[in-house]
């Protein structure tokens, strides 16, 4: 009877496990330059985060979904290395008759894409790709305060390359807890038999 219960529990756990929620981390590699310095790094987002202003056709905010990393070589900010996580991503439609996609505040370190024709961001959702030819503006802005730099410098680096990496599914914490509980249960069932 114990053996049947163990196998029944394992079968139920294996049935549930594939359906457990997981986030997909979408990552882009980028290169940007201001003519004297070059920034290389990654930015991206967790596409499972829901819009925190649903129903508003002109704005979507994905709180804490984003990240931005990079390093600077050359120019005023030479040697700066940064890693920001938990950034808000926002899709802003009809911002001065254009559409924008940005991390964080417009007056801080951020990645920014602007589409004056309002055709790239047709809905309040996170984009699947970034073709630089589709944008009127595309840049990474680095603020000295965010990087801990002196002298004061706010530099805007024009994006010259954005390449999508393969999206990676990452289990949610609840999925990991369920997985651990299943392994613990199997271990305990094995101990009882011996």
Image (cartoon, grey):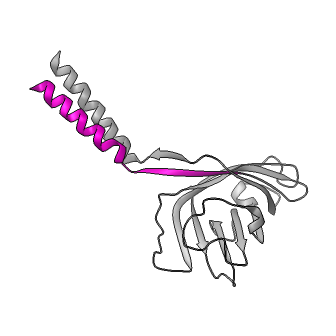
Q: Residue at x 29, y 44 (%)?
A: 16
Q: Residue furthest left?
A: 1
Q: Position of residue 119 (x, y in %)?
A: 67, 75
Q: Is residue 166 magenta?
A: no
Q: Nearer the viewer, residue 49 or 116?
A: 116
Q: Name the chief secondary structure element in magenta.
A: helix
Quarter of the figure with residue 146:
bottom right
Quarter of the figure with residue 104:
bottom right
Q: Give the total of numbered labels.
A: 0
Q: Position of residue 5 (x, y in %)?
A: 14, 31
Q: Residue furthest bottom?
A: 97
Residue 68 seen in the figure: no
Residue 158 relative to residue 179: left or right: right
Q: Nearer the viewer, residue 75 or 60?
A: 60
Q: Nearer the viewer, residue 67 or 193?
A: 193
Residue 126 seen in the figure: yes
Dividing the image into 4 quarters, which one contains the C terminus?
top left
Q: Position of residue 90 (x, y in %)?
A: 59, 69
Residue 122 relative to residue 17: left or right: right
Q: Residue at x 48, y 69 (%)?
A: 51
Dividing the image into 4 quarters, which one contains the N terminus?
top left
Q: Is residue 10 magenta?
A: yes
Q: Residue at x 35, y 48 (%)?
A: 19
Q: Residue furthest top?
A: 194
In the picture shown, does residue 101 fall above or below 190?
Answer: below
Residue bounds of the magenta highlight: 1-29
Residue 183 relative to residue 161: left or right: left
Q: Position of residue 82 (x, y in %)?
A: 69, 50
Q: Residue at x 76, y 62 (%)?
A: 132
């Amino acid at each position: 009877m114990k053996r049947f219960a163990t196998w029944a529990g394992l079968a139920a756990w294996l049935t549930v496990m594939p359906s457990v929620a997981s986030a997909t981390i979408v990552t882009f590699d980028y290169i940007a330059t201001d003519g004297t310095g070059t920034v290389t790094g990654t930015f991206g987002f967790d596409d499972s985060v829901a819009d925190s202003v649903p129903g508003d056709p002109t704005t979507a905010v994905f709180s804490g979904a984003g990240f931005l990393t990079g390093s600077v070589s050359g120019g005023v900010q030479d040697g700066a290395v940064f890693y920001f996580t938990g950034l808000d991503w926002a899709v802003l439609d009809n911002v001065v008759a254009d559409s924008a996609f940005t991390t964080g505040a417009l007056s801080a370190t951020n990645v920014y894409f602007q589409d004056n024709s309002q055709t790239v961001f047709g809905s309040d959702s996170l984009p699947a790709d970034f073709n630089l030819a589709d944008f009127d503006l595309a840049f990474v802005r680095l603020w000295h305060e965010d990087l801990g730099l002196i002298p004061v410098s706010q530099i805007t680096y024009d994006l010259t390359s954005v390449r999508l990496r393969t999206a990676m599914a990452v289990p949610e914490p609840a999925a990991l807890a369920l997985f651990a509980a299943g392994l613990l249960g199997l271990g305990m069932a094995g101990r009882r038999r011996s």
